Amino acid sequence: MRVVSGRFRGRTLVAPQGSTTRPTSDRARQALFDVLAHAPWAPGLDGVRVIDLFAGSGGLGVEALSRGAAFCLFVETDEAARGAIRGNVEALHLFGETRVHRRDATDLGLRPASAGAPFDLAFLDPPYRKGLGERALTSLSSGGWLVPGATVVFERAAEEAAPMTPGFEPLDHRSWGAAAVYFLRFTGS
């Protein structure tokens, strides 16, 4: 797995061993970021604060940083995945631009002051077919983790229904192989 574009283009990322993590393929990541860069509703990546839930190897957050994001908070409960994220952060010298939280993405609670300002962009790539993504959206919304109008990128299995969570409006939907990706806007209502 490699960083697709930006200042770290071509750099290899490590992923944890085993089947507990399912990294987004380079091709799907490129397509996803093309949407974020070129869609008429897309806010751009320069200077944004990113939260990467169910972060796995951290590939989505690292890609956002490579393309101009200012900061990324990686949220992951799996110890091996957090180790991979830390390894990627160290290899790319992203200290000060990142933090790794061992939290349950479905139960974030209120955003603590130590997490900094609310986030402009959220990535959710939960395990498929478990309903964890909707719970994480609710947690983001109720905990004050997102700025009004924040963009959310929600990946799930292609055969799963579109996410239906109050406070988020659909912007776009794409399918790449076994994955469906939903682009949402946080309305807070």
Image: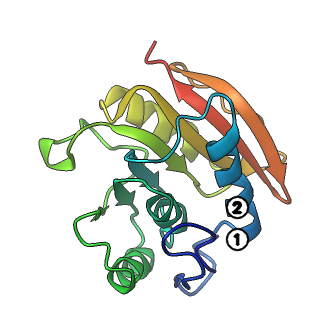
| Residue 29 pos. (x, y %) | 67, 61
Nearest the camera: 29 or 8?
Answer: 8
Where is mark 1, residue-wise? 26
Image check: 183 left or right of 107? Answer: right
Q: Please give the residue where the numbered disc 2 appears in the rendered image.
A: 30
- Measured along the vertical axis of the image, is residue 102 above or below residue 48? below
Residue 131 seen in render: no
State whether residue 100 is above or below residue 45: below
x and y, in percent, of residue 187 in the image: 48, 18
- Is residue 155 in sight in this rendering? yes
Residue at the spot 17% in from the left edge and 42% down from the top edge: 112
Q: Which mark is residue 106?
A: none
Quadrant location, the N terminus: bottom right
Q: Are marks 1 and 2 in contact (CB under 8 Å)?
A: yes
- The amino acid sitting under disc 1 is Asp
The kind of secondary structure element at disc 2 is helix
Residue 130 rendering spot, x and y as whole percentages:
63, 49
The residue lying at 58 percent from left, 74 percent from top is 3
Q: Residue at x 43, y 44 (%)?
A: 106
